[in-house]
Image (spheres, rainbow, N blue to C red):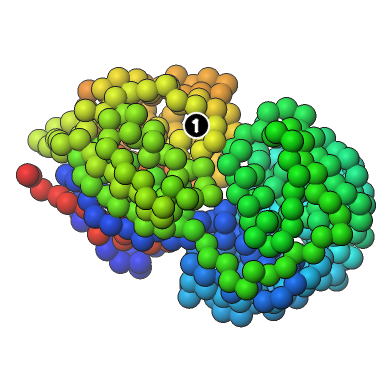
Amino acid sequence: MPAIKTLEALTMETLTLDPIRRISGAVNLPGSKSLSNRVLLLAALARGTTRVENLLDSDDVRVMVAALRQLGLEVQGEPAAGSLEVQGRGGPLPGGAHELFLGNAGTAMRPLTAALTLGRGEYRLGGVPRMHERPIGDLVQALRALGADIQCLETEGYPPLLIRGNGLEGGRVGISGSTSSQFLTALLMAAPYARRDVVVRLTDRLVSRPYVAMTMALMKRFGARVERRGWERFKVPSGQVYESPGRAHVEGDASSASYFLAGAAVSGGEVLVNGCGSESLQGDARFARVLQRMGARVEYRPTSILVRGSSGGSGSSGGSGRGKPAGKALRGLDVDMEAMPDAAMTLAVTALFASGPTTIRGIANWRVKETDRMAAVSAELGKLGAATEVGENHLVVHPPPALKRASIATYDDHRMAMAFSLAACGGVPVQIEDPGCVAKTFPDYFQVLEGLVERGAD
């Protein structure tokens, strides 16, 4: 069965990817999800009109745009056009009574939870069932300590939430950084409009540190400063007002780049991704360095990354239902991926094509993502023939001598679908269940992938 070629085909329950010999070509990356939703919220809080360019068109971004409009913000344009204009408030978001549905978008739920405490209104925030299983207690407790009135409506520490906004008093607060960096991001983004200075102290280690660095860099672009002492203490002076920069360009999504770069590495191809590079704000832009350690050749440019894989190619299943993984010149490695947990999923599938085991560390927070990714990744790798060892904060992948044909469950998790598409480089067809789940961040992922794919014998 041929690989997908039309958007309409994404309505299928499954998608079969025929064996891929090589992945090569150039990709213009869609905008980053994390940057898109941060920029949208900052634009809403800022004084003046912001034109947001290269905005990601995805479920998560549409959820944020819909929420801002429901709150009374003037937003001209649609994410599908790649750009829109936000007329900022120059202060807290509008009040009133609102019930916001935020799907499974953590990049909308967490920052909006903090931002809505600044204004005067009553807000109910909920989402899909999985969102109600994703913890938010650390953020709720910190906001309560700063004067917010927030109630967890069903289970303490989890959405859905009821926020009675009456302004945020500010002050000093401690917060855990070990579950999600989005909690600290949410506090920092809201803090300039608190009545008093906000001083945040981390009570433990901070995961995904580059995402907090990204937040602070964006706040600076919008005219607000954060004073940082190491990665343990952050101070945001009160009385600041976000000012629109006029134009805000969203970088290409480095997490999405990882699939194409890894595809080149495992298949012996050559891929250039345009939109993020050595000047990127995103931690996942460093994923190519991991591929380099495994044996790929890597070249960084300010706004692009080039990866060349070792020569080789996928084997043939020969009708046996098993294939020979490509790129065996890749080496297994032991690497801490705490700073780029999304790209760590790509690495887990890349590890199928290495000559030895790969140990991925720093991924305890996989368990509280769109699905329990630790369990999901291990289960689906097992279907392909790999042996795995699951620890509290790590996963070891032992590649099989040859991949098995498999139907990959995606758990309504976009990154499961995209990462496991690379298994088709192993010489056997791979079936992806619920391919449409990629709409969360990359609706036309499979079309873009197909444009880079070479099939058949060398």
Question: Residue 265: image x %, image y %?
Answer: 27, 39
Q: Is residue 335 above or below residue 157?
A: above
Quarter of the figure with the C terminus: top left
Q: Is residue 387 above or below residue 187?
A: above
Residue 33: give x, y in percent of width and height.
54, 56
Q: Can residue 61 be seen in the rendering of this structure?
A: yes
Mark 1, residues whose alpha carbon is within 10 Å: few (<14), some, or many (≥20)? many
Q: Residue at x 88, y 49 (%)?
A: 197
Residue 239 placement (x, y as % from top left): 87, 59
Q: Please tell me which residue lies in front, 172 or 236.
A: 236
Residue drawn at x 49%, y 58% as measured from the top left: 251
* Residue type, mark 1 in image: Met
Point out the residue furthest to the left here: 458
Q: Which percent across, then down, holds residue 444? A: 38, 62
- Residue 97 appears anywhere in the view: no
Could you say which quadrant of the image residue 12 lies in? bottom left
In the picture, the quarter occupied by the N terminus is bottom left
In this rendering, would 48 be left or right of 347?
right
The residue beneath circle 1 is 337
Q: Residue drawn at (62%, 73%), measured in percent from left and top?
A: 246
Q: Is residue 416 left or right of residue 407?
A: right
Q: Give SS at disc 1.
A: loop
Residues 152 and 183: in front is 183
